[in-house]
Amino acid sequence: MAPEPVNVNEFKELARQALPKMYFDYYAGGAEDENTLRENIEAYQRIRLRPRVLVDVSRIDMSTTVLGYKISAPIMIAPTAYHQLAHPEGEVATARAAASCDTIMVLSYMSNCAVEEVASSCNAVRFYQLYVNKRRDVSAQLVQRAERNGFKAIVWTVDAPRLGRREADIRNKMVAPQLKNFEGLMSAEVHTLRGDDGSKLEAFARKTFDDSLCWEDLKWLRSITNLPILIKGVLTHEDARKAVEAGVHGIVVSNHGARQLDHTPATISVLEEVVQAVGGKVPVIVDGGIRRGTDVFKALALGAQAVLIGRPVIYGLAAMGQRGVKSVVEMLKNELELTMALSGCPTLEHITRSHAKMASEPVNVNEFQELARKVLPKMYFDF
Ligand code: HOC
């Protein structure tokens, strides 16, 4: 019997063993040369922590609220597609795990289980992810079903007018599995494309995702739902400002798990730029590359309200079903709790910008010399 994992990273190998190669590659892969995929993780490793000592940390409170919903820790479940490829219980198992960890799950627009099935399976607070379909009536019906079934917010994913080039899926001729939500809304041929040429997901996205979507369309979205809208896929201060002006209720800094446009920056390295542009008007959430409680702590120090966990949740689900997802979230919570204790932060409010140091940031006068060496021609630096 394989030993129980002791950290979130160890679930990846278990998932590889549990899954057919086509599905593991789909979850694990990124776009093109996977530069951003690596960078999402490595950028966290370059950030240093600046702990404080002699603070009473005998009680640590990690609880927070997102859009007014209280959760046990600022660690939520990201929308990821097709959970039944990872485990037969699919999104129902993930939602139950979210409920047992007292956190929020964002259900993917591309979920295998129906919105109603997930809603009735547990009492987790759930948000619903939306990709806007070329057929607006399909998207409207799904959003309204989510609203009727008690989902509390829409997570409008805006970074996928087309699908990124995922070469593992192309090689594997990745097949799109059955999506119950679309039954009766779209013909089966559309939502379960078959054939043997390249990635069926890419074909599905090209056929159905609305690639004419623009800022104006937020008005349409607001006209079909009363739910708060988080925009997911923002990476620049320019778009963050536009989003706030357009009236969104929150921003998710995301590069889609590095699955869309390769060579975008790691999300953690643009988080602060977005947070500053937003100026506290709406919450900012971040996803991508979070594998440790220290990563969560760093994201909070740089201004995130909470983080979303994608691949590790899928790996937990593939390895052990509901128990695996719970275990992934609990491991991150435990590590965050320890990081807070060792950093002198008994509550999330104690975590400040000065608890993290970016690789490029000097914390004393001596470090300016090295920075100056990098920016000056040698002749001037030597002088
Ligand atoms: C068929 C279209 O977000 C991913 C998911 C799902 C994308 C839509 C697939 O794989 O990045």
Image (tube, grey):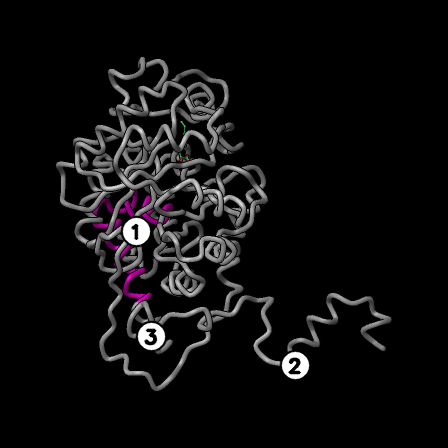
Residue under pointer 1: 76
**Most foreground residue, 298 or 215:** 215
Q: Amino acid at mark 1?
A: Met
Residue 196 percent across, percent down from the top left: 46, 17
Q: Is mark 3 within 8 Å of ligand 1?
A: no
Q: Amino acid at mark 2?
A: Asn
In which quadrant of the rendered image does the C terminus lie?
bottom right
The quarter of the picture showing ligand 1: top left
Residue 366 is marked as: 2
**Is residue 86 visible from the viewing direction of this image?**
no
Taking the spot 46% from the left edge, 33% from the top edge, the residue there is: 215
Which badge, 2 or 1, comes first in the chain's sequence?
1
Residue 329 located within the stretch drawn in magenta: yes
Residue 163 percent across, percent down from the top left: 48, 30
Above or below for 300 versus 169: below
How many residues crowd mark 3 within 10 Å: few (<14), some (14–19), many (20+)? many
Q: Amino acid at mark 3?
A: Cys
Which badge, 3 or 1, comes first in the chain's sequence?
1
Residue 221 located within the stretch drawn in magenta: no
**Most foreground residue, 283 or 122:** 283
Residue 178 occupies which quadrant of the picture?
top left
Taking the spot 39% from the left edge, 17% from the top edge, the residue there is: 193
Q: Secondary structure at mark 2?
A: loop
